């Protein structure tokens, strides 16, 4: 089944720099997946990856949204933002690589493990980015 044929679709806004609301979109995604009775392993993987992607918008971008398309066996998360973009995606994927400022590190973020975790948690991940424009991350989650 592809996105268009998915049984459910939601979009949640994410505001860059808003650490008070950070994580809200991923919490809502998790609740929806629990309500539709999605596989618990998939829910855990989506929750972790979606949280990391949402935090990247909060930490690194200006504004964005998380979109969820789901049925019981397949979840697609697309996180799209307006922001500085990622110049070198391969470098950004390196475990431990982070450009997060000290102010963000002091809050416990910026370990540089977000993108590698997202890759590990998802069945398929694709990043598209344009410097000075923004970034789109698409992740697909399926049962192994
Ligand atoms: N949405 C984004 N917009 C701009 N840059 C990003 C975005 N997501 C990730 N990056 C870049 O990739 C780096 C690595 O991301 P990540 O692995 O999540 O680590 P962290 O968020 O802890 O820095 C970030 O430090 C940043 O330079
Ligand atoms: Mg991150």
Image (cartoon, helix red, strand yellow):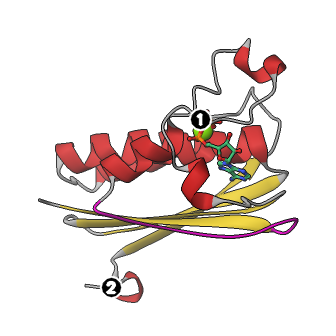
Quadrant of the frame with the N terminus: bottom left
The numbered dot on residue 49 is none
Q: Distance between the residues labelled 2 and 1?
A: 26 Å
Is any atom of residue 143 visible in this view? yes
- Specify the segment rendered in magenta: 123-133
Q: Where is residue 138 in the image (x, y as percent from the top left)?
A: 49, 68
User: Looking at this view, is 114 or 80 the one in front?
Assistant: 114
Q: Position of residue 125 (x, y in %)?
A: 41, 64
The residue under the point 28% across, 62% down is 123
Task: Name the chief secondary structure element in magenta.
Answer: strand
The residue under the point 72% across, 58% down is 86
In the rendered view, does 43 fall on the left or right side of 82? left
Q: Where is residue 110 in the image (x, y as percent from the top left)?
A: 65, 27
Say whether mark 2 is within 8 Å of ligand 1.
Answer: no
| Residue hosting label 1 | 23
Which of the four quarters of the rendered structure image does ligand 2 lie in? top right
Q: Is 97 placed above or below 75 here?
A: above
Other residues around mark 2 within 10 Å, as few (<14) / some (14–19) / many (≥20): few
The residue under the point 74% across, 11% down is 106
Indicate yes or no whether the magenta region holds residue 121. no
Other residues around mark 1 within 10 Å, as few (<14) / some (14–19) / many (≥20): some
Query: Which of the 4 image quarters holds residue 122?
Result: bottom left
Is any atom of residue 31 visible in this view? no
| Residue hosting label 2 | 2
């Amino acid at each position: 089944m592809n996105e268009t044929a998915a049984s459910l679709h939601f979009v949640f806004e994410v505001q860059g720099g808003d650490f008070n609301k950070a994580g809200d979109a991923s919490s809502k995604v998790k609740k929806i997946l629990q309500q539709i009775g999605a596989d618990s392993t998939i829910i855990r993987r989506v929750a972790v990856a979606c949280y990391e992607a949402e935090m990247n918008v909060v930490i690194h971008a200006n504004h964005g949204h998380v979109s969820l398309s789901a049925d019981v066996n397949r979840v697609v998360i697309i996180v799209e933002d307006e922001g500085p973009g990622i110049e070198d995606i391969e470098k950004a994927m390196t475990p431990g690589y982070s450009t997060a400022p000290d102010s963000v590190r002091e809050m416990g973020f910026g370990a540089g493990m977000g993108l590698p975790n997202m890759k590990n948690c998802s069945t398929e991940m694709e990043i598209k980015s344009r410097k000075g424009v923004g970034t789109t991350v698409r992740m697909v989650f399926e049962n192994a």
